[in-house]
Amino acid sequence: MTKRNRQFTAKDIAYPALMCALLLGGQYIFSFVAGVEIVTVLLVCFSAAFGARRGVVCAAAFSLLRCLIFGFYPNIVLLYLIYYPALAALFGGLGHLKKEAFAKPLFAVIINVLLLGIACACLLLNVLDLIQISRLMKTTITVLLWVTFALTLALWIAFNALLTVQRIGKKNAAELVRLVVFTALSATCTVCFTLLDDVITPLFYGYTRGAALAYFYTSFTAMLPQTVCTVVTVGLLFLPLTKALETVKGKGG
């Protein structure tokens, strides 16, 4: 049987199955720690190393099987089935690009807009005091907004500095530029996950406008620490995890 005719192999099932088990175990363990999640970095690294198809299979299996641990909630199942396969497809596609591609003007514009957009949003939310929640929660959210602002601003500075270094002939900067791109996109996707939940859940349960707005404000208590966690985990673990997974893929095919 030729490679073109072979639609699916045992490894196309085995690799996603192993990563799915790791995702389930990781989510269960870190579910006891508020605001900390490991699913994004693991799925991003797996999809980048093994490709979009295997990543999407893993994401879909994870989205369904997690119900056995955390219970069946239709709105959450829908949210996961939309978000995580899309996340795997995005980073699976980006994983096939050469490192030098991430220094092209298109990526430079996208990453600059995303990072500056998140930083400006955090700054405005704090300065204009737009989030209407309890005083105790507001203190926590204010701190997290400043932390998110600082991290995204640092990523923006690092990204443009590395672009400059790469363009003057330092090829070893290409790997770090790619790292910043993946970190920035992962953080943006984490924000989109919460915003998608802010749409799906109120629509599914038929919330009133006031209840939907309250749900949106409350979601910041989950979104901000998860965004910070994503920046830190992807920034620190993406390179070693991806290299380890690529080694496994190279040996196993």
Image (cartoon, helix red, strand yellow):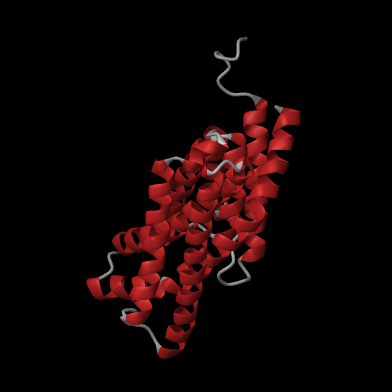
Q: Position of residue 93 (x, y in %)?
A: 49, 36
Q: Nearer the viewer, residue 178 or 142?
A: 178
Q: Nearer the viewer, residue 48 or 35?
A: 48
Q: Is residue 108 above or below residue 225?
A: above
- Residue extending farthest to the top is 1
Quarter of the image for residue 30 reads: bottom right
Q: Is residue 121 above or below residue 7?
A: below
Q: Is residue 42 left or right of residue 160?
A: right
- Residue extending farthest to the bottom is 135
Q: Position of residue 222 (x, y in %)?
A: 48, 70
Residue name at image x 70 percent, y 42 percent: 243
Q: Position of residue 169 (x, y in %)?
A: 57, 41
Residue name at image x 55 percent, y 13 percent: 5
In the rendered picture of this protein, how many numbered marks are placed on residues? 0
Question: Quarter holding the N terminus?
Answer: top right
Residue name at image x 44 percent, y 50 percent: 83
Asked whether residue 183 is in view, the answer is: no
- Residue extending farthest to the right is 251
Q: Nearer the viewer, residue 109 or 89?
A: 109
Asked whether residue 110 is in view, the answer is: yes
Q: Is residue 127 left or right of residue 224?
A: left
Residue name at image x 43 percent, y 59 percent: 115
Question: Quarter holding the C terminus?
Answer: top right
Q: Position of residue 228 (x, y in %)?
A: 53, 66
